[in-house]
Image (cartoon, rainbow, N blue to C red):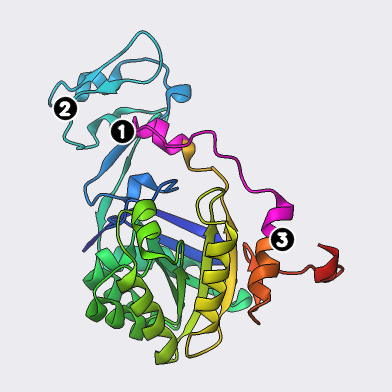
Amino acid sequence: MGIVFDLKRFAIHDGPGLRTTVFLKGCPCACRFCHNPEGRGREPVILRRGERCTRCGACVGVCPTGALSLPARGAPVADARCIGCGACAEACVFDATEVAGRQMSVAEVMEVVSRDIVFYDESGGGATFSGGEPLCQPEFLCALLEACRERGIHTAVDTSGYADAETFARASRRADLMLFDIKVVDAARHEAFAGVRNETILANLRQRSAGGGAMLVRLPLFPGVNDDEENVKATGALVASLPRRHGVDILPYHGLGVHKYERLGLPYSDAGLAPPAAEHVAEVARALAGFGLEVSIRGDAWPPADESPDAL
């Protein structure tokens, strides 16, 4: 059994081909701008959509602890008595309230993943395990990876790399592809951004490269945080120094997760942060390519086929 907070079918940015992405709850990091804040903790959390709420009061009436109340405007508000049981979500016929996080068995997850085997075969896709940080549920993750292998389904693990060496190695041996995020190379800067230092992350990065398994390094690009020349060059030098050659995929900040903080009732730091300009993303791609790396921007080859690097 494990705790899943979302399953997304027909995903196109979570590895090659068409994929089903399984989001596992729990993460040891506390990254600024996290786009899946509902996946951080292991316990279920409630998201409320004020724009869908009709203020019928059905959710208030079924709350077993009396934690819910209706303010003058917007969605119901829960106080400290909320236990995250999900009774309010079950009572809401307008999907204004939803629970992120439910226990599922390997068989239940595989029933969903297996529905699209024909599309995986035709597109070169498969299943991707993301989060949160999927390595926070190592037994469940490894069991899912093994179940996919038994069915001939390609697997990818989308990870920050923050786990002890044994846990990482167990998952790494079973995964066909690792999508490995490198956010900041300097350890102190990484701690300021993600809440943890990155020595363990970098050790696991090298272990995967030396072990021979497929890996794509991904650079989530945050304006004013890690898109400066120093960090970009350090990232390029790091990837170029690995035992084997690996591509780099740049993931420009998009801000699509901001609404989740509102639905969770959480503050969002730097709410005014804008996505990086296309010209700047191209500059970052050019700098990384200067280290002899194959670079893509959110899965798309760079430079475009009809343009030369000098034209960007």
Residue that carries the numbered disc 1 in the rendered image: 89
Q: Nearer the viewer, residue 153 or 137?
A: 137
Residue that carries the numbered disc 3 in the rendered image: 282
Which label number is shown at residue 80?
A: 2
Question: Is label 1 or label 2 in front?
Answer: 2
Q: Is residue 137 left or right of residue 285?
A: left
Q: Going 34% across and 33% down the picture, which residue do you hit?
A: 266
Secondary structure category for the residue under label 1: helix
Q: Amino acid at mark 3?
A: Ala
Q: Is residue 95 magenta?
A: no
Q: Amino acid at mark 2?
A: Ala
Range of magenta residues: 259-282
Q: Going 54% across and 77% down the picture, which residue do you hit?
A: 237
Q: Residues within 10 Å of mark 1 (few under 14, many from 20)?
A: many
Q: Amino acid at mark 1?
A: Ala
Distance CA(mark 2)–CA(mark 3): 47 Å
Q: Going 45% across and 62% down the picture, which residue do you hit?
A: 184
Q: Is residue 6 left or right of residue 169?
A: right
Q: Residue furthest front?
A: 230
Identify the mark nearer the N-term, 1 or 3.
1
**2 and 3 marks in contact (CB < 8 Å):** no
Q: Quadrant of residue 104?
A: bottom left
Distance CA(mark 1)–CA(mark 3): 44 Å
Secondary structure category for the residue under label 3: helix
Identify the mark nearer the N-term, 2 or 3.
2
Q: Quadrant of the N terminus?
A: bottom left
Q: Position of residue 147 (x, y in %)?
A: 33, 78
Q: Going 55% across and 39% down the picture, which residue do you hit?
A: 273
Q: Position of residue 145 (x, y in %)?
A: 35, 77
